[in-house]
Amino acid sequence: MSSPKNSIKVAVLPGDGIGREVMPACLELIDAAVKLAGAPPVTFDTHQAGAQHYAETGEALPASALEACRTADAILFGAMGWPDIRFPDGTEIIPQLDLRMEFGLFAGVRPIRWFPGLPKVLSDPRAEGIDFVLIREQTEGLFYARGRGEIRDDQEAYDTMQITRAGTERVTEFAFRLAAERKRRGKPGTVTCVDKANVFASMAFFRKIYDEIADRHPEINRDYAYVDALALNMVKKPWTLDVLVTENMFGDILSDLAAGLIGGMGMAPSADIGENHGLFQPAHGTAPDIAGKGIANPSAMFLSGAMMLDWLAVRHGEQNLAEAARLIEAAVEHTLSTGRAIPMEYGGKANCAEMTRSVISSLGAVQKEVA
Ligand code: ATP
């Protein structure tokens, strides 16, 4: 834990598409929540980066933006990438992957939970109890192949999956610690190892390391699932899941499936955590189909902001930052459960600005229940 701070500096990268719409809304909300909680002020250092910036300047992630991220207390990220803007080799502009590698952001933390007031995707009443966290390894796995893939004679293509002992140990340890923390809050205390250990040597190795880490945490339940079976059970009985840990590509796919369980990407926050840095971003992308219309649901961005405040609270021993996080979560819940504003993504009438106004004006109403 670092020492308490007089002020917190956050590097802000709004990026492209709806990232540019949900980010200003989130900064306004964080500012209001932090003030209400009496937490140290949070200052924002905003930098341009992403596909649009690349189109304008030839640079996707300027060195100044990277440096700001390196020296900030946390990084708040909107979304980056645009289908029509590509590098000369045809690949998409996705600096978020570079940031994960640069700062060793090995744990992709994807919490999924049900919010009362939203239309239900699953008809089973137990779906109201959906509350699990998917931990995606983010520095190796099949994404190791990015930039290394090989096509031979226009006949064969190869992408290599990398699973290392160190990479698997650190992400599995992270998952077990999170499960222990959740258990203290009444959750089951289970970590499910999601793999394909019955087919691939790399995945059997992943499971072996999982077992070694599990030995150090006897208070936490072990659980194993092949990724295909897990995909089925994630839809059939997601309320039984607690913490899941998995390889990079499996995690990429399962996190979109998980967001689908609660009706869409606009309610799914995420955090990319490393030893020394934390980057917080909604699980969604730039949503080119709705960008520029002002109708994006900012809730995933808001909840990612709350995850950032929680992470900062632990790092700097500042309980008031955690209170600001609780205020944001409770204000989102209050907005939805009272029907004050339902996002257009869920068939409601509230656009991005209306959702933002409603959540900010709910902060006062939830302050008593949070205190
Ligand atoms: P990426 O490849 O970067 O993940 P994508 O295009 O696959 O991007 P998203 O940008 O997340 O995926 O969009 C998927 C769908 O979800 C789109 O139809 C988009 O409009 C919708 N969507 C994503 N985020 C939101 C949001 N915050 N509010 C409303 N709809 C959203």
Image (tube, grey):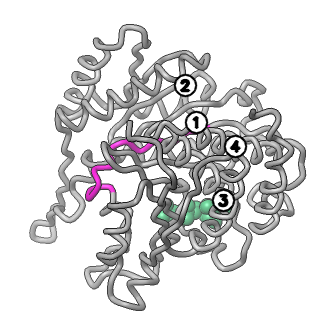
Q: How many residues crowd around disc 4 within 10 Å: few (fewer than 14), some, or many (20 or more)?
A: many
**Lower position in the chain sequence, tag 1 or tag 4:** 1
Image location of residue 303, percent across then percent down? 62, 49
Task: Give above or below for 144 relative to 106.
Answer: below
289 falls in the magenta region: no
Distance from Cα at disc 2 to Cα at disc 4? 21 Å
Q: Which mark is residue 319?
A: 1
Question: Mark 4 highlights which residue?
Answer: 329
Could you tell whether 261 is left or right of 164 in the image?
right
Q: From mark 3 to mark 4, how far is it between C-alphas?
A: 14 Å
Q: Amino acid at mark 2?
A: Leu
Q: Residue at x 33, y 78 (%)?
A: 62
Magenta span: 100-112
Give the residue number, with chain letter if any, for mark 3.
Answer: 31
Give whichever of 313, 263 is nearer the camera.
Answer: 313
Q: Nearer the viewer, mark 2 or mark 4?
A: 4
